[in-house]
Image: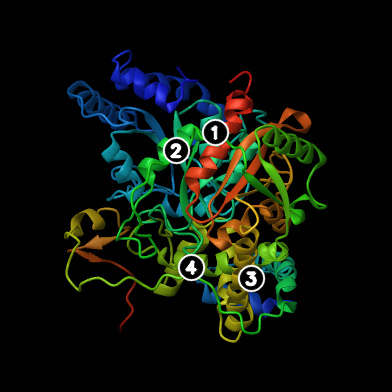
Amino acid sequence: MSLSTQDVEKVARLARLAMTGEEIETARTQLNGIFNLIAEMQAVDTDGVAPMSHSQNLTQRLRLDTVTEANQREAFQAIAPQVEAGLYLVPKVIE
Amino acid sequence: MFESSLKQLGDALRAKKISSVELTQSYLERMAQLNPQLNAYITLNPELSLAQAKAADTRLAVGTAEALTGIPIAQKDIFCAKGWLTTCGSKMLHNFVSPYDAHIIAQFNTAGAVNLGKTNMDEFAMGSSNETSHYGPVKNPWDTTRVPGGSSGGTASAVAARLCAAATGTDTGGSIRQPAALCGISGLKPTYGVCSRYGMIAFASSLDQAGPMGRSAEDLALMMNVMAGFDERDSTSLQRNKEDYARNLEQPLSGLRIGLPKEFFAAGMGSDVAKAVEAAIAEYRKLGATIVEISLPNSKLSVPVYYVLAPAEASSNLSRFDGVRYGYRAPEYGDLTEMYEQSRAQGFGAEVKRRIMIGTYVLSHGYYDAYYIQAQKIRRLIAQDFVEAFKQCDVIMGPTSPSTAFKLGEKGDDPVQMYLSDIYTIAVNLAGLPGMSIPCGFGDNNMPVGLQIIGNYFDEARMLNVAHQYQLATDWHSRAPQGI
């Protein structure tokens, strides 16, 4: 498998990473090297094997639907790039 | 004093031979002198450190001190600590002063330990040499032209150079064990789920695990007593009874069965590393252990499997860095999408972007089953190999890293070469097992070699016993780099 320039551009767009044409080409070479390493995996017969995400086969723990966190709005907004009147500011998204 | 164990420091503090403020001050002076050449710390905050030391002295005076009360401990900069700059080695978080404490930080605070500073690391813990840090590479105190390993390279360098009494690390694919090996110190990655991930900036959530790094197994046991424990704020945290990790340290090793995976002793390991590891195995025979050859047939697949799973989880975890609520925002942008794209392009370094792109690709439509699910299936095969192996042995041993510390810049251009330096450590994370590295001698250029000890699930106390008995019989762990 080999990624094309268009493939890499698409991935960069999905990942929300602005990249120049030169960066796309460097990434393409490096990603292809990494996918060659990963390719070894494809030949393994895994029929009937269950995917594993946690070694102890835990099920997700549930908790009561109650508020446990204290309101720290001011502390959290103090570290934001741009806030006004308690709101996070971003470029206009609705005309 | 800089050579004292945590137990000795605790005894000296409780006996009032030294105060925590004096001890902390001594470390801060040593750091001011040596850190500029090592770059082991990203952030120092003497005011906060000394305030904690003062509070510890009050506890020591009134007799409510615990084992680590008053002892200066360094924290990897991946742990959110209230009031501390917490960068995770990234420009993305260059201005992030955490509004809250990670569970691990809170545990150390409750124990009365002093936070001595935040240690340097590979950006978002992605790297094996500490060269991906936005705050510059860390130097190995044994040879400052060489890397300390990564991603917990700042911690490893600080511990080896005696710039803290002990410190924390995190290990997703070897990030505690590999730098411990390369810097000649001891490090333990516990069973997945033993230490809470709350407030530990996420890289690959199904693999990330915090653990202690220090100068001896005995020190690691005391650190584990503080770090381990259930936390309901981490959904993968395990509910288990509290245990004393130092309880088995003094047990003799006669009858211990050590499994040596033939795959770990095949081609790929440096001859200097092989020599030191074989000498360590011989020492274990003298201590009464028996050797069993075992096989981990699927372990060769662990690097490819890891480079699907870890980037996939990273691409999801790192989507939170969008320049809206905290962290870096690009100075110039047009619309919202451009603000995201520019902030992330400027805020993340090359390795992080590479992994986000791999992850985005393998999770994208049409590839999920072929990559992510296939990798999770092979992950089970790798874990089952260990289950079979532990029917024949109590612990598994081998090298931690195929080579000793390499030169700064040596593996800079080829990510794949860098990835292969974690070839012996990754399978342990995939299986969720505990693993550790202890110093076992020196290789070429007089650089330290690490012995990896892999235990069965929840067998940390036995592994620490196995390491401690070796450290009673040898002195590799107490060697200090010259000129530092």
Q: Earlier in the sequence, mark 3 or mark 2?
A: 2
Residue A33, position in %: x, y?
74, 66
Q: Earlier in the sequence, mark 3 or mark 1?
A: 3
Q: Are labels 2 and 4 assigned to the same chain?
A: no
Do the CB atoms of the residues marked 2 and 1 lie less than 8 Å apart? yes
Q: Are labels 2 and 1 assigned to the same chain?
A: yes
Specify the label residue A54 is tagged with.
4
Q: Which residue is mark 3?
A: B381
Q: Residue at x 67, y 29 (%)?
A: B143
Extreme residue in the bottom direction:
B366
Tell me if B100 is positioned left or right of B396 in this view: left
What's under tag 2, amino acid-wise?
A: Ala
What's under tag 1, amino acid-wise?
A: His
Q: In 3D space, how far apart are the residues under numbered discs 4 and 1 (Cα atoms)?
A: 30 Å
Give the quadrant of the C terminus of chain B.
top right
Q: Secondary structure at mark 1?
A: helix
Q: Residues within 10 Å of mark 2 (few under 14, many from 20)?
A: many
Specify the label residue B221 is tagged with.
2
Q: Is residue B472 above or below residue B302?
A: above
Q: Secondary structure at mark 3?
A: helix
What's under tag 4, amino acid-wise?
A: His
